[in-house]
Image (cartoon, helix red, strand yellow):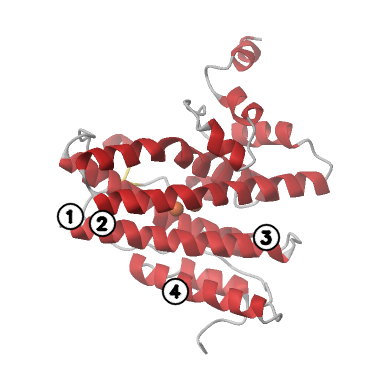
Amino acid sequence: MSDIPATLAECAVAVLTTADGREKTALSHRMAAAWFAARNAGTPMPIGRGNPPDFPARPDKPELLNPRDMPRRRPGSAAGRLALLHAVAHIELNAVDLHWDIVARFCDVRMPLGFYDDWVKAADEESKHFNMVCDVLESLGSHYGALPAHAFMWRAAADTRDDILGRLAVVPMVLEARGLDVTPGMIALFEKAGVANAVEALRTIYAEEVGHVAYGSKWFHFLCGRDNIDPKDAFHDLVRRYFHGALKPPFNEEKRAEAGIPPDFYWPLTDEHPARNAAERL
Ligand SMILES: [Fe+2]
Ligand SMILES: [Fe+2]
């Protein structure tokens, strides 16, 4: 384990600067194991200071396209299902980087060690998710990189690079919460098509993503409480500032509640909310 860096921030940067998905996630698992081994031994690794790249290293493939230019495929077709899995793999790889980025990016903000435990665990789980989905793609004769992928996945991270509250609001509490809304439909689609390994991967993702959203809500509320800020108002302000567009119902209200996000956080950010529509007419 001698090649494990001395600080957690350097571990994060090592993952962020590794381009290949399988290599990035293998490194991510090893860095997470080193962090938790040191924690369990009672000698936590220092957080240190990171200099994370503006954009994480990425493989040559997939080609990154403007979402407008992404080919459209019928969701019920085999090609549509493959494209969906490819999109999930891309999301998971971005999520690995997003969780390591929050560890390295905000070292100047004093946080309890539990903050780092949560995001290292989340990054470790995203690494597993990426590999599970890649295994499914390969079992179906494809692979990550075979299709184009969404070019703007890092936008939320770039927009919030100086704002930890904005990062927590937009990444775990909006983007990852959206995953809770859409994953049950995807599970049903693959159940209907009889793709057992895809169902298994998506069920694992669904179960573990609730935790990631909950970490977001927990640390968002912690920071608001420390600074005596109203969390609901702050959430609305930050999402309107950093997230481009309205939130889309239907919401998975049960899982969002389990993750600590009450309805009055997200409903006012939809187009359909009467209060928001009235406010915009003023
Ligand atoms: Fe994930
Ligand atoms: Fe996640």
List x then y, in percent, for residue 231.
74, 37
Q: Mark 1 or 3, which is nearer the eye?
A: 1
Helix, strand or loop under label 4: helix
Q: Position of residue 115 (x, y in %)?
A: 67, 60
Disc 3 crowd rating (10 Å Cα; few below 14, some 14-19, many 20+) is some
**Residues packed near mark 2 inside 10 Å, few (<14), some (14 to 19) or many (20 plus):** many
Is residue 70 visible from the viewing direction of this image?
A: no
The amino acid at mark 1 is Leu
The reply to whether discs 1 and 2 touch (Cβ–Cβ < 8 Å) is yes
User: 125 or 230, which is in the foreground?
Assistant: 125
Q: Which residue is mark 2?
A: 136
Question: Tag 3: residue type?
Answer: Phe
Question: Residue at label 4?
Answer: 27
Q: In the rendered structure, which disc, 1 or 4, sits on the residue that comes first in sequence?
A: 4
Identify which amino acid the numbered label 2 is placed on: Val
Q: Is the residue marked by circle 4 packed among few (<14), some (14-19), or many (20+) residues within 10 Å?
A: many
